[in-house]
Amino acid sequence: MSEKLAERWMINRIGLLNFWYYDDEIFEFADGRLLLRGANGSGKSVTMQSFIPLVLDGNKSPERLDPFGSKARKLEDYLLGEEEVSGLDERTGYLFMEFKKEKKDSYITIGIGLKAKRHQNMDFWGFVILDGRRIGIDFFLYKMEIGDDGKRAKVPLTKKELKNRIGEGGEVVESQKEYMEMVNKYIFGFSSIEEYDELIKLLIQLRSPKLSKDFRPTVIYEIMKASLPSLTDDDLRPLSETIENMDQIKMHLDVLYRNMAAVKKLKNEYDNYNRYILYEKAGDLVKAYSDLYASKKEYDNLTKDIENYRSTIANLGNDIISLESEREALKKKEEQLSSGDAKRTQKELLEEEDRYKQYLEDKSKKEEELRNKQDKYYGLERKIKNR
DNA sequence: GCAGTAGATACACGGGTTGG
DNA sequence: CCAACCCGTGTATCTACTGC
């Protein structure tokens, strides 16, 4: 059992004093339930169904008291009975209901006092006992007095006497409205008295014997409809706004679906386009790779050529130096020969001159070759730099 | 004798039922 | 469906009673 349920008030006892056929009667409830058994017409429903709404809100209308909804019997009759039978013209009665908290020994008692006079307005007062005193145990709704016949009799407390007995331990009110508000405040705790009234109305509807007599769904539907509070504009507004929002969302969704279909078409075209572009770029890439490979190879070859030409140039330089020194040696020899026997050496001179001429030819030939090699070398160097 | 209270009476009003 | 009616509620006013 949850804490909240353990905190609620549950009917524990109900009691009647000078009401209907009861002088002083208390019914005990078990776990908030009471079983009444008796033959048809013995007064089970008259007693209880009249009693419960009356004690809960103090409304004394005859149609409220009668479970069949007629107003044949007034509250006055419940207290005084038929004039010829009871002989009573004035009587004070009490009805009370004791509530207990589940699993706790705390009690609240609510009740009403009624003073009826034949053919006159009934006096009404309602009370609540909050300090835990319990009727029939340590609080009594009557006092014992010696009657005219000399016997001790129970005399119900008057309104004023009850007020004094309850004192600070509860409240006494004198109008039906105040009583209803008081019961709601201490027992039910509805935020407004109207809500509490709706509950009582529902109780009245549900006790209707129509429920068992005429068990048609339409009748049940009417009873349930009548017992439910009507919806206010404030209640309905969130609902209508939600429906309106749903319409808007639906429309928005439709637009989005249409947009999506259009965008999908566009996307397909774009995909094709992009695939084509990708193919082109991939072709370019492959070609660039092969170009790169070829250029690298060419670069390597040219680098090798440069190396060769460099060594050739170096060799030719050495050749020039050695030919220069040979020329020097021949010049010296020529000087020696010119200073010696001219005739004897004339022949030798001519031979030497021929050799010299041959040498000069060789030299210019070698220089020509060197220039060509150098030109080629510079050309290659420029080509590498530009890569 | 006085002030406060209870009781009686009249009346307007609202909720609910009845009967044409 | 509506006017008539019944009944209870709340209020105002007057009268009678009671305790100091």
Image: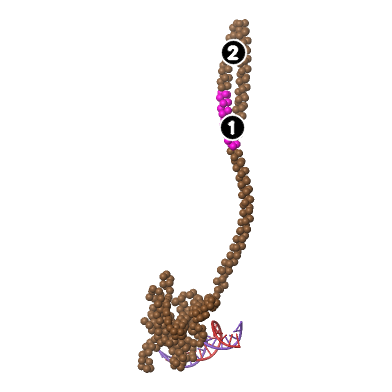
Chain colours: A brown, B red, C purple
Question: Where A281 sits versus A210, above or below?
Answer: above
Q: Tell me what residue is drawn at x 61 percent, y 6 percent.
A: A344
Label drawn at residue A331: 2
Residue nearest the observer in this picture, A53 or A368: A53
Placement of the N terminus of chain A among the 4 image quadrants? bottom left
- Report if residue A113 is visible in the image: no
Residue nearest the observer in this picture, A324 or A313: A313
- Determine which quarter of the picture holds residue C2: bottom right
Label drawn at residue A190: none
Mark 2 Cα within 10 Å, few/some/many (few <14, many 20+)? some
Q: Tell me what residue is drawn at x 63 percent, y 17 percent.
A: A361
- Determine which quarter of the picture holds residue A38: bottom left
The residue segment tinted magenta is A290-314
Say which chain tag 2 marks: A
**Coordinates of residue A364 in the picture (x, y in percent):** 62, 19
Say which chain tag 1 marks: A
Q: Is residue A154 magenta?
A: no
**Coordinates of residue A48 in the picture (x, y in percent):** 45, 82
Going from N to C along the chain, the mark reached first, 1 or 2, is 1
For badge 2, the amino acid type reads Lys
Mark 2 lies on a secondary structure that is: helix
For badge 1, the amino acid type reads Glu
Label drawn at residue A298: 1
Does the residue at mark 1 contact the one at mark 2 (Cβ under 8 Å)?
A: no
Left or right, A127 with respect to A283, comes to left
**Coordinates of residue A342 in the picture (x, y in percent):** 61, 6
**Coordinates of residue A156 in the picture (x, y in percent):** 41, 87
Q: Tell me what residue is drawn at x 42 percent, y 86 percent.
A: A22
| Camera-side mark, 1 or 2 | 1
Q: Is residue A301 magenta?
A: yes
